[in-house]
Amino acid sequence: MKRLLTCGLTAIALLAFALAAGAHEPPGEVFLAVQFPDTHVPNIDGFDDDWSAVPLEVYAIPSSMLFSVHGFAGDDVPRGGMDPASMQIRHILGWNDSRNEIYVTTKIFDNKHTITRQDLGSYWWDDSIEIEFNPRHDYLPKPEDVVTHHKYSFAFPPLNGNFGPALQTAAVSSADVENPTLLSNGSRWYYCTYSFEGEEYGESTYIYEFRTIAIDSYPKPTEENITEDQVVEHDLTAGEVIGFSIFVSDVDDSAGDADNRVGMWATTPTSCCHSSQDLLISPMDDTIDWGEPTGTAVEAQSWGRIKYQYQQ
Ligand SMILES: [Ca+2]
Ligand SMILES: [Ca+2]
Ligand SMILES: [Ca+2]
Ligand SMILES: [Ca+2]
C-alpha cells in the first residue's frame, strides 16, 4: 500500500480501471474520491473555492454522466440527457484519512430554485439533494439487523427551519426506520451547508458542501433511537472501494401540494436508494498542486465566504 500512497494520477486511473471489473452500477465504472491532505481539508462553508486544485477531468461527475431515474424527466431519456437550460449539475467527492471523513461538493444551475412544499417532511417535492454512502460496500440485499446504507437528504434554504425529513434529523438509513436524532446536521457525524448566486428562489447556481464521518453500521432503531456509542465507524483506507449514490431532484413550477418533479438526476442508472455506485477511496494524487497550507480548516475564512458576508 505504501507504493500506492505515493503514486500519481496515471496509477489512480489504472487502479480505477482494474477495479471496474467488479463494479455494480453502472457496470464497469468506478468513481473517484480525491484524497485531501491534512493541510487542505475543505472548510465546510458552502463555498467550493477550497476544491479548486482538484482536476475536474479526473474527479468531477458532470451532468453528462448522470441518469434520469423514475421517469420525472420523461421516457427513454439518455444518460446526460438533461436540458441545460433547466438544470446543470457537477459533483466532486473527496476524503481525508486523519479525520476519517468523506466530502462532497455539488454545484447546481437551476432555471428556477423552488421551495414551496406544504408538507415539511416531503423534501423531495422541492429542489433537493440526497447523498448516500455504504462504506461497508455490502450492496444488496441490505442486512436485516444493522443499518449499513446511510442517507443524507437536504432541501435548502430551510423552510420553517426544516430542510429534510423529520425536522432536522436528515440522516436516515434507507430502510424506513426512525431517524437517529444524534445524527443531526452540524453534529460531528455530518454537516451540509450551501451558498447561492442569482435569485434565491429563481434562476440561480447553488453550491452544496458536505462532510460525514464514514459509518460502517449501527443497529436498526426500534422503539428507541440509537445512542452514539452504538455507531461503528468505518476506517477509510486508500485503495478501497465503498458504495455511494447522489440524487438531485428538480422542481420548477409547483404550488407545493404534490410531487411536481421535472427531473431526478442520479449517479445510478436504476433507482433510488441504495448506494450502488463504486467509489474508489483514492491514494494521494501527487499531480495535484494544493498550494500553500490553509491552516486549520475550521478557522479558515475563504474568499468566497468573505465575499458572501459583504453581500448580506
Ligand atoms: Ca468550502
Ligand atoms: Ca429546472
Ligand atoms: Ca484510515
Ligand atoms: Ca428547480
Image: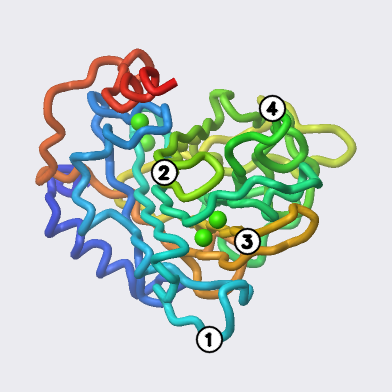
Identified by mark 1, the residue type is: Asp
Question: Would you name the residue on which mark 2 appears?
Answer: 104
Task: Residue at 40% x, 39% y: name it.
Answer: 197
> Mark 4 CB in 8 Å range of ligand 3?
no
Front position in the image: 127 or 288 = 127
Relative placement, left or right, of 219 versus 197 is right
Callout 3 secondary element: loop
Q: Disc 1 on helix, strand or loop?
A: loop
State which mark lies toward you, 1 or 4.
Answer: 1
Position of residue 13 measured from the top left corner of the image (x, y, whole percent): 20, 62
**Type of amino acid under label 2:** Val
Tell me which label, 3 or 2, sits earlier in the chain.
2
Q: Is residue 99 above or below residue 223?
A: above
The percent position of residue 23, horizontal first and vertical second, equals: 41, 70
Q: Which residue lies furthest to the right in this view?
A: 223
Q: Residue farthest to the top?
A: 299
| 3 or 4: tag closer to the N-terminus | 4
Q: Does the residue tagged 2 have its C-beta within 8 Å of any atom of ligand 1?
A: no
Which residue shows up at 27% across the image and 32% down it? 50
Q: Distance between the residues labelled 4 and 2?
A: 21 Å
- Distance from disc 1 to disc 4, alpha carbons, whole Å, reads 41 Å
Q: Distance between the residues labelled 1 and 2?
A: 29 Å
The span from disc 3 to disc 2 (Cα, nearest Å) is: 18 Å
Residue highlighted by disc 3:
273
Foreground of the two, 227 or 304: 304
Ligand 1's image quarter is top left
Check disc 4 and give the amino acid type. Leu
